[in-house]
Amino acid sequence: GNSVTQMEGPVTLSEEAFLTINCTYTATGYPSLFWYVQYPGEGLQLLLKATKADDKGSNKGFEATYRKETTSFHLEKGSVQVSDSAVYFCALSDQADNDMRFGAGTRLTVKP
Amino acid sequence: EPEVTQTPSHQVTQMGQEVILRCVPISNHLYFYWYRQILGQKVEFLVSFYNNEISEKSEIFDDQFSVERPDGSNFTLKIRSTKLEDSAMYFCAGKEYSGLLFFGPGTRLTVL
């Protein structure tokens, strides 16, 4: 079945550091890939998405490229801010599956 | 911009009591979902709902759980006899045609 594996946390960075959170997936079909973010005390918010191979999703300085050859969708940001502190979830949606599969989540803490 | 709403934001109940969690999805969505997140753990799929019936459910969604959409607007999750391990954040979501899920802010359920 479909599944998502993402880098275990927690990740602690200093402000303006470069961020990478790894995500790889297993899917039988042609899934869409997502990154969701959960700020402290809040619900899940879509951060970015990519619906086909080689698509790049981007939002708020975050980027992720859908790589079919490596079955990956790594999240990157060139310069993190304290306000980026949150839990980040990689997710996969396949029309055949009818639900969304989430990774375990990676907690990011950015220190000033 | 339309959004998914959930009530209450926090529900405290005694073990063995019934609870109903309410969601109002975005009106033009057709698929609806409940997910839960036990504190600090991954987001888990519970159930999906389409055309007024359950289309898929996970192992977590046992006979104590039920869902319904009684009036074409509200989408509810009922837990018949709550257990301590039901304490979690419960997220409602709706899916648009593109496959993108929109999540509500969540209901924090605390079972004492």
Image (tube, grey):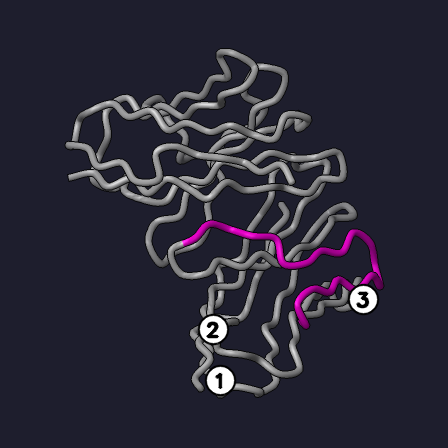
Do the residues under discs 1 and 2 have CB atoms within 8 angstroms?
A: yes
Do the residues under discs 2 and 3 have CB atoms within 8 angstroms?
A: no
The CA distance from mark 2 to mark 3 is 27 Å
Q: Position of residue A48 (x, y in %)?
A: 68, 58
Snapshot quadrant of residue A109: bottom left
Q: Earlier in the sequence, mark 2 or mark 3?
A: 3
Q: Mark 1 — residue?
A: A13
In the displayed structure, does residue A104 sit left or right of residue B9?
Answer: right
Crowd tier of the residue under label 1, counting other residues whose Cα lies within 10 Å: few below 14, some 14–19, many 20 or above: some
| Picture layout, residue A21 above or below residue B95 | below
Secondary structure under tag 2 reads strand
Q: Mark 3 — residue?
A: A69
Report the quarter where the N terminus of chain B lies.
Answer: top right
Query: Foreground residue, B65 or A112?
Result: A112
Task: Tell me which residue sits at (60%, 41%) in the image.
Answer: B102
Q: Earlier in the sequence, mark 1 or mark 2?
A: 1
Report the quarter where the C terminus of chain B lies.
Answer: top left
Query: Foreground residue, B16 or B29?
Result: B29
Specify whether disc 2 shares its chain with disc 3: yes
Per the rendering, the mark at residue A108 is 2
Q: Position of residue A19 (x, y in %)?
A: 59, 80
Q: Earlier in the sequence, mark 1 or mark 3?
A: 1
Q: Position of residue A112 (x, y in %)?
A: 44, 86
Q: What segment is highlighted magenta in the picture?
A: A42-61
User: Hey, what amino acid is under mark 2?
Assistant: Leu
The chain holding disc 3 is: A
